Amino acid sequence: MPFNLKPITSPRQIRLGDNDAAPPTGLPRHKHLDDAAEEHVDRIRKLQQKLYADGRFALLIVLQGRDASGKDGTIKKVFRGVNPMGCVVTSFKVPTELEQQHDYLWRVHERVPPRGMIGIFNRSHYEDVIVTRVHDLVPKKVWSERFDQINDFEQMLSQNSVVILKFFLHVSRDEQKKRLIDRLEDKKKNWKFRAGDLDDRALWDDYTKAYRDAIARCSTSWARWHIVPADDEDARNFLVARKIADTLDALDLRYPALDPKLKGIKVK
Ligand code: ATP
């Protein structure tokens, strides 16, 4: 299947209209897509084992998206094969009092995975140039200086063996509406509904602008953004899984060879 997510290398590629959330034409639907995703989920499973044994790199996955864009579902599906010992998920919420007393990257740096591990950020330091901007939580001078700071931070990580992949899960207004209604109507999903989600929905265009700028300013050669059409869950999972598997593959991971001093040793 030829379809692959393209990294953002120019602001012209950033299309965040409602139509851009539909799965790309040419992708098969449902059963076939699920089977295709399974292939990449399995590649991730095998490659994660190698990443751990190889011990040279860490993989950091950054997931951003509006409310109900499917960040949790993506994590659950794409990483369903991985050994929990090799993977840490961090969900970034409104900063605590302690976190607010530090610089905004303090809590983030602490959660960057060590070599051998996959770290998944469910929301991230990008909230500090998105929600803070849209809700006027900090002055423009403060959030606008953060783009360069984030690029420097991510460059430092990449120079220290952290491979960074960033995904924006892009849903349309209609699809978000459907999912929010579902959260209100389905008893098993009521707990996911936050009244604040509706306030954020009313600020749709402001969020689009903030996401556009963050993606444009911070899609660097060392930490690329990918926009994932996320209205269709199977397509979303397939695209994300494939990109992650391909990225791990490109690292040319190896199982370390037996120490030559141990060659010929007998286990009694
Ligand atoms: P879903 O996307 O499925 O609705 P969620 O990620 O919104 O789930 P919640 O616990 O409901 O999970 O929301 C976390 C909230 O924390 C979000 O509203 C987010 O904007 C907010 N948040 C995260 N980081 C920051 C930050 N640095 N400053 C202010 N708010 C933040």
Image: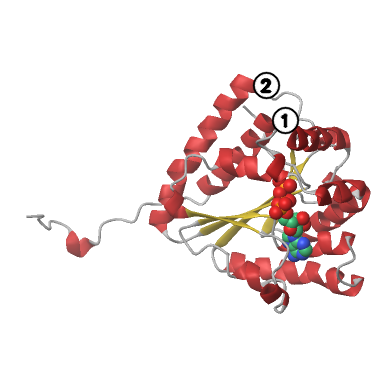
Label 2, ligand 1: CB separation under 8 Å: no
- Location of residue 178 by image quarter: top right
| Of the pair 220 and 150, the residue shown nearer to us | 150
Whole-number angstrom distance, CA of label 1 to CA of label 2: 9 Å
The answer to which quarter of the image holds residue 224 is bottom right
Relative to 24, say whether 124 is above or below: below
**Left or right, 116 with reference to 4:** left
Residue at left offset 11%, top offset 55%: 267
Front residue of 131/38: it is 131
Q: Which residue is mark 2?
A: 29
Q: Which residue is mark 1?
A: 232
Looking at the rendered structure, the kind of residue marked 2 is: Arg
Q: Residues within 10 Å of mark 2 (few under 14, many from 20)?
A: few
Left or right: residue 203 compared with residue 25: right
26 over 133 or under it: above or below = above
Residue at image position (80%, 67%) is 147
* Residue 225 shows up from this direction: no
| Secondary structure of the residue carrying numbered label 1 | loop
Which percent across, then down, holds residue 111?
Answer: 58, 65
Seen at 65% across and 36% down, the residue is: 188
Labels 1, 2: front one: 1
Q: On the rendered image, what quadrant is the N terminus found in?
A: top right
- In front: 89, or 44? 89
Question: Residue 255 placed where, x, y %?
Answer: 36, 52
Q: Quadrant of the C terminus?
A: bottom left
Q: Is residue 8 visible?
A: yes
Question: Of marks 1 and 2, which one's residue comes earlier in the chain?
Answer: 2
Percent x, y for residue 110?
A: 58, 70
Q: Is residue 156 above or below residue 184?
A: below
> What is the crowding at mark 1: few (fewer than 14 residues within 10 Å), some, or many (at least 20)?
some
What residue is shown at x 77% (from left), y 46% (from top)?
67
